[in-house]
Amino acid sequence: MLKIDDLHVRAGDTGILRGLSLNVGRGEIHVILGPNGSGKSTLMNVILGHPKYEITGGTIFFDGEDLTALKTFERARRGIFLSFQNPEEIPGITVENMLRTAKQAITGTKIKILQFHRELLATMSELQIPPEYAARYMNIGFSGGEKKRNEILQLLTLNPKLALLDETDSGLDVDAVEIVSSGVAKFHTAENSCVIITHNAQILKHLPVTHAHVLLNGRIVRSGGSELVAEVSEHGYAPFEVTP
Amino acid sequence: MKTYIADIERALYDVRDADKSVYKSDAGLTEEIIRDISERKHDPPWMLEFRLKSLEIYQTIDLPTWGPDISALNMDEIVTYVKPNAAQVSDWSQVPDDIKRTFDRLGIPAAEKKSLAGVGAQYDSEVVYHSVQKQLTDLGVVYTDMETALVEHEDIVREYFMTLVPPKDHKFAALHGAVWSGGSFVYVPAGVDVKIPLQSYFRLNAAGAGQFEHTLIIVEPGAKLHFIEGCSAPRYNVTNLHAGCVELFVKDGARLRYSTIENWSRNMMNLNTKRALVERGGLIEWVSGSFGSQVSMLYPCSVLHGDGARCEFTGVTFAGKGQNLDTGAIVVHAAANTSANINTRTISKGGGCATYRSAVKVTRNAPHAKCSVNCESLMLDDVSRSDTLPVMDIEGDEADIGHEAKIGRISEEALFYLMARGISEDEARAMIVRGFVEPIAKELPLEYAVEMNNLINLELEGQL
Ligand SMILES: Nc1ncnc2c1ncn2[C@@H]1O[C@H](COP(=O)(O)OP(=O)(O)O)[C@@H](O)[C@H]1O
Ligand SMILES: [Mg+2]
């Protein structure tokens, strides 16, 4: 589904990703572990074509199509979703209005307002988001935890093929992580895939993790199964810092 | 990553009917013209005198030396008075067809159907269509055109007319006093709550014609009114001048909401004067949208004259290519415990220039005055300009004055966030702009909010 090969990325004069490769197949759940500043968010942003980053080498393919030739919104319409590490606040645009516009854009069909409203409220209730948040402006005045639950609300509403989750569990209390984790579990099927960036094994509790990777200094230095998650939480990243 | 947003497609709004007017005064402004206008309008003698006095003042005052360049104006070329080819009617079916077509495109009958309280529509310089629901009349509410008011309520008009905006105020106030024609008159007796908004819709039609309509609204103690004025004008080659005047009298404990969406053709010089006098415990609420025109100078002024008088001002201004829109608000705190809240959004695009200019004055007689000003500007590209020029003049004791100004561009991160949800770049930009003016849109009645959003979309979209 997602095929990244020898990717080199820089922002300004700084090289951030230096030869990163990653293959994500249908139905798989990949976890990416790595210390702060190792390039995890950069990878997520580059997959969606953030204008700040420049690809200096390598390729990104999605379902056989070269993503780098597509605009950000075209990538989203192909079925890629990013749960942002720091979701943007957008004044004057309500959660419901933005999500309905997005859903319409992605599905290419006109959406019935009332039916959409009912479905949205049902999903919000599963995520324990109060119904009045539908009419609030996007992330304005939301707590950190509310912003992250709002990202999962968007994931469940837009139902992409590939979900990229960038530290969606960071800064959340135990109960909120549980809500987010069940939300992702609800989204996941054998037909779609997840790439989850986390520092915390708790979000993975309900999820059948198939692969895990350690990202250090812009490169994946180790790949394995879910056992890698336990290894990192026990020993940290020091054992992976091998100088070539 | 910069997208060029093409200029507005204004065809929808720039409808021009063949000029069928029956009478035009000579170009240029002379005493003969003023006498002629006055005679045709059957002015009472005091009004003729008022006009002639105003003309005298006009000829002695210079054009303003500050603000946008208005040297494109040549008063000698402006036909100041055009009498439309229709007598006043109160039934829609009697309105001539071409005039009707213009109004149809502006949505007047639709508004009527929605059972709004009354429709006064100014076509060129004289009101041709007017209806007031019987229930209003029964309440003692008067809603009519200024000419009729001058006949039927002469004493009221004489008491208030241009006392708040005297002709000597500035050159265009003097001009207005000399040549004013048409406009709305509303009188709400004490204690009457007018539950449905009254609305009027007017526009300029004849090439080169100035429009000098006068709006006079008096809301007596404890009464309540919402008045909506919308304007749109077709485009012409000749420089057009609009120098209207709005005078609002809000008495003790009364409330007046005065909403306007102005959408002028791109050659219009819009030099409008609006002022409210608010007595003890009264409230004036301005909702003001300024679109179109070549130059606009518009600073609605609230004189908070009685203890505890209040002002809420909400405004949006959109300056596109070739436009210089200089707008803002003025508040004079002239009594104790008066308060004001000013909240504005300005947008500039395609080299347009939008200036927010405000003045807050707190006199010695106004202890504990409170005023908060919040103005935000959005520049949609690198060639557009936005300025904020707030002036504060504080003499009163213990005034609580806050001022917050922000000038910014569309955030790349916000754009990326919306696009990452599948929303196209153009739509994402439009959403962000609409979101930016949302605090104003939500103050408008629904159909006007929709119209304003349509205007913004037209401004943003054009043909790509
Ligand atoms: N726009 C940018 N310009 C310059 N440096 C950047 C930019 N974005 C990220 N970086 C740098 O790239 C490195 C990786 O950042 P990031 O991908 O956010 O790391 P992570 O998400 O793994 O914590 C950091 O050193 C960061 O400072
Ligand atoms: Mg990160």
Image (tube, rainbow, N blue to C red):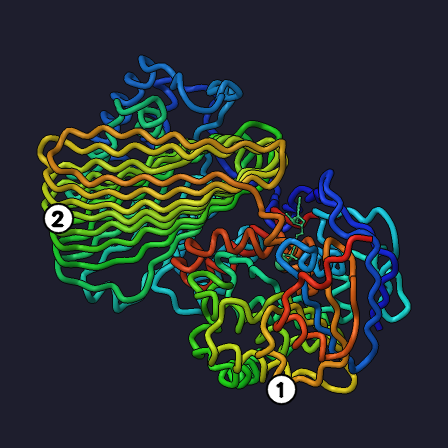
Q: Position of residue B131 (x, y in %)?
A: 36, 60
CB under 8 Å between callouts 1 and 2? no
Left of B128 or right of it: where is A35? Answer: right
Q: Quadrant location of ligand 2?
A: bottom right
Give me the disc on residue A206.
Answer: 1
Q: Position of residue B68 (x, y in %)?
A: 47, 24
- Name the amino acid, label 1: His
Residue situated in front as seen by the camera: B50 or B318:
B318
Quadrant in which residue B326 is drawn: top left
For disc 1, the chain is: A
Crowd band around label 1 with a 10 angstrom C-alpha radius: few (<14), some (14–19), many (20+) = some
Q: Is residue A121 above or below residue A53?
A: below
Q: Residue at x 61, y 72 (%)?
A: A233
Residue A84 visible in image: yes
For disc 2, the chain is: B
Left of B315 or right of it: where is B383? Answer: right
Quadrant in which residue A169 is drawn: bottom right
Left of B145 or right of it: where is A210? Answer: right
Inter-mark Cα distance, 1 to 2: 61 Å
Q: Residue at x 27, y 26 (%)?
A: B167
Foreground label between 1 and 2:
1
